[in-house]
Image (cartoon, helix red, strand yellow):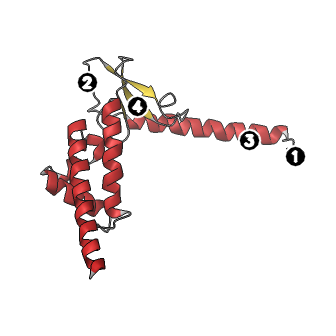
Amino acid sequence: MKMKRSIYELKRDGREQNKKNKRIKKEHKRKIRDDAPKVCPFCGSPVVVSHSAQYYNGDNTHLLYVCTNSECKAYANASHKSTLADVATRRARQEAHYYFDQLYNEAQIFHSRTEAYIWLSKTLNIPSDKCHMKFFNEKTCKEVVKICKNKLNNVNKIGNIIQQR
């Protein structure tokens, strides 16, 4: 059974929500980067800043860089310094993350995510500060999947050999 709330409780909740909204707006202002993308790398259309509600299931707490071409569907989180990603790139990043995360979660090949990213940067021969899925294009993500699968298969083969002894 729902209890009725007093007018004072409703006003208090409204004030708290207003404070939260103001805080979010301030955070959004800080999150817009100087190096924000101006042009979509996939279709060449202009890129604008937009709220995240239509992209993140109604969650309106993030700002995004969004391609103005509605068919392109490329966007990036403004606060995470990620590069724009179209649908294919986002799927490739998700798959790469899936196999990469297994290296330090399930398989426990690495003790931490940081250690796994250091290994990946050396394997891909890229600087460690540029080695993150949010920067990778579709081709690099496919390479990450291949590398991670090989690493996981090698560990599984070694594990099977040890179990057979």
For marks 3 and 1, give the one nearer the viewer. Answer: 1
Q: According to the image, label 2 marks what residue?
A: 42
Give how far apart the Cα atoms at labels 3 and 1 are.
22 Å
Q: Residues at badges 3 and 1 in contact (C-beta under 8 Å)?
A: no
Label 3 vs 1, first from the N-terminus:
1
For marks 1 and 4, give the one nearer the viewer. Answer: 1
Q: Is residue 57 visible?
A: yes
Residue 47 rendering spot, x and y as whole percentages: 32, 22
Q: Residues at badges 1 and 4 in contact (C-beta under 8 Å)?
A: no
Q: Secondary structure at mark 3?
A: helix
For marks 2 and 4, give the one nearer the viewer. Answer: 2
Label 3 vs 4, first from the N-terminus:
3
Q: According to the image, label 1 marks what residue?
A: 1
Give the number of the disc on residue 12.
3
Q: Residues within 10 Å of mark 3 (few under 14, many from 20)?
A: few
Q: Residue at x 34, y 27 (%)?
A: 74
The correct choice, above or below, for 140 with respect to 165 in the image is above
Q: According to the image, label 4 marks what residue?
A: 64
Displayed quadrant of residue 50: top left
Outermost residue toward the bottom?
Answer: 165
